[in-house]
Image (cartoon, rainbow, N blue to C red):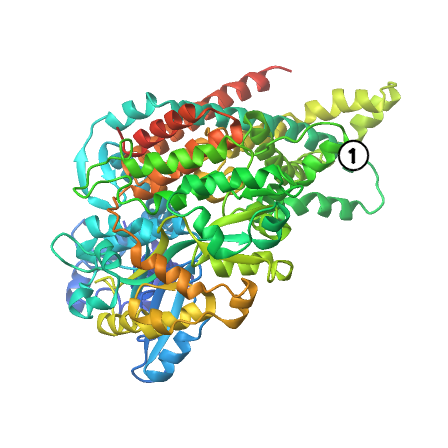
Amino acid sequence: MRTSIRRSQRLMALAAVAALTTGLLAGCAKDSNDSSSDGSGGGGNGKGKITLTIGTFGVFGYKQSGLYDEYMKLHPEINIKENVTTRTDVYWPKVLTRLQAGSGTDDIQAIEIGNITEAVQTQANKFVDLGKEVDKSQWLDWKNAQATTKDGKLIGLGTDIGPMAICYRKDLFQKAGLPTDRTKLAEMWKGDWAKYVDVGKQYMKKAPKGTKFVDSASSVYNAAVGGASERYYDKDGNVVWDRSDGVKKAWDAAMSVATSDMSAKLKQFDPTWDQGFANGTFASVACPAWMIGYIEQKSGDLGKGKWDVAAAPAASNWGGSFLGAPTAGKHQKEAIALAKWLTAPEQQEKVFAKQASFPSTPSAYASLKPAADTTAYFSNAPLTQIFSDAAKTIPSQPLGPKDKPIDNAISDIGILQVEQKGKSPSQGWDAASKEIKDVLGQ
Amino acid sequence: MTSPKQALAHPASSADAAPGTPPGAARDAHGRGTQPGADSWRSRLYRWDMKASPYAFVSPFFVLFGAFTLVPLLYTAWYSLHHVQLSALDDQTWAGLDNYRNLWSSEFFWNALENTFTIGVISTVPQLLAAIGLAHLLNYRLRGSTVWRVVMLTPYATSVAAATLVFTLLYSWDGGMVNWILHFLGVGPVNWRESDWGSQFAVSSIVIWRWTGYNALIYLAAMQAIPADLYESAAIDGASRWQQFRHVTIPQLRPTILFTVVVSTIGATQLFGEPLLFGGVSGSKGGSEHQYQTLGLYMYDQGWIIGNLGKASAIAWSMFLILLVIAAVNLLLTRRLRKSP
């Protein structure tokens, strides 16, 4: 009798082990399928209720401006869950691997402008063609062009864009003996980023103690290159970064900043950059529309009414995203409807009112209103006017699959070496070239 | 063949013995021959059970090991022999050893290797020395010794991200506390992130801060296992505290020291989080001149930022080989040290 009991115990244990193992393996498989849409099988949400997931990075403002709640009220059968990954460099590789595995993607995935060309060229068959679902003329042409494949498939709907302006501290400009009027300033640097650098030289002659004219040389580079009609790739997809006129001009402007003393030498989005806003250590920064909210938040009460916004030397775009619906999503029809709704002019307008992310849909511009707080913060500057004027004249710029790594190499290697390590511009350029060759695997 | 125990057990469980075979067949096969039948099936089952069950019991480990270590390892090896982009995993072209050749002729790789080594040395050596010293102090009779021990372990319990963020602020070149203190000492500000040795020192200091207490506790545990009479007899012989430390404590700690050296070396080779976060927004570059880009960072940059998975896999395998070499050297040293009195 004893043995038989022992044996059955043994068998039980064996079975338990087996169950555990298979359970574990099954768990892996199940998890990845399930994360795209829980709720439908999980129960507890009521009958027939669908959970749509939307994957984003950074702050998109949908939650903040109450759009999810509004949509769920309009569509009681739908429940929206946002999965936020703060850093794009973490977010995008994750999306890429999930797209290719064909599982684990969210029903809607946000795509950053730096990644859109890679998505268009390599992942188009993993996304729903949204061109058939929407009226494409709602968006700016160049915005649509960025998300459209060669054979005309639209894989993402434009969210915001980043038309550029110059944000500056009126009080510091005044102390340095510069005009503080935004139209006068815009006139002073109109047409060329080199002129903006010239204003910087003037500023430095009488700069208030402890302040610099601009936050960093890379921000000038970034702003200037964002308005070029060609930067790292030409329209046929060839890499032309080392002979593109746009890059050269922007590089030169950045170099004259880096080799003078007008830069606070900060790195954008570092904690020290935030401190720079809070302490007022730099007097101006090239600011795309989405940075307005950031400045307001980081400068805090001390900066209220001291900041002002003027038109940038040349129209330029920095940033902006798209919403795409992966074909691996479980609720494609609902996802398309939601993406459509979130990117419609009325909703973009609401996001702008909340945090000044600028719409990519021109029909919204007429009725666009920033929050009253924001307007007061920036000395009642006509934000809508400035940004929509810029938005309309931004050139359509061909992007390429390695656009972002190339851009990083120039800013974080080339310019930084000159600005912070005292290297010469040609040494900085060489270092960037070497890095880009490494990026392109040459 | 049939053991008496089994025969005893038989009647009790005859019903479920062999559902497929008719009862008659079972009785017929009750002989002592090797003829197949219910009973010998049962005995075979029993033997099979005795042999296979142990494997089944340890299998979860091997299943996990296979799924999360072995398969990825081999898959990485496969990738490293191909041109693969992160954006097109299925689109692989055979590259042979191209990725390795490319890598070993790349100055970025050697730079990363060198950085990994120097940062490893300047973080591990002071860390272990300080840990022994601290452990020695804690080993004295102290008031509130538990409190001190907990305090020692606190940095280890902090997340890498939190610690690095604070250190980044301390080391910021404009308005950071370290430069502020240096200013009072009459030293000019150091650009901690962009200068060559400064950035490596800064990264090392985060590692030292986090791991010293951890190692100190390990040493302390080993010290407390040293028999007290060794110290007593040393004291009778007139050995001072310092002599006791040198001639009693250190030799007794030798295996522990070796253990911590091995663990710290592996940790240093894989150093990733601290330099990544210290670098801020573009941390994977390890500074504008890659001055603190470790192998881990270089791999991450190639694989996940740039998207050259083939090359990143080659880096991963190179790191693996380097670790094997380190392990071999450690083994040799350990043997040598064990033999010496």
Query: Which subunit holds the residue at mark 1?
Result: B
Residue in the picture at 35% in, 62% down: B9
| Towards the viewer: B309 or A428 | A428
Q: Quadrant of the C terminus of chain A?
A: top left
Q: Quadrant of the N terminus of chain A?
A: bottom left
Picture coordinates of residue A68, whole percent (x, y): 39, 75
Circle 1 is placed at which residue position? Answer: B137
Q: Tell me: A343 left or right of A289.
A: left
Picture coordinates of residue A16, whole percent (x, y): 38, 61
| Towards the viewer: B215 or A275 | A275
| Category of crowding for the residue at label 1, using alpha-carbon neighbours closer than 10 angstroms: few (below 14), some (14–19), many (at least 20) | few
Q: Is residue A194 visible?
A: yes
| Towards the viewer: A347 or A391 | A391
Q: Tell me: A67 left or right of B23.
A: right
Mark 1: amino acid = Leu
| Towards the viewer: A27 or A160 | A160
Badge 1 element:
helix
Picture coordinates of residue A219, whole percent (x, y): 45, 44
Q: Tell me: A333 left or right of B214.
A: left
Residue in the picture at 16% in, 61% down: B28
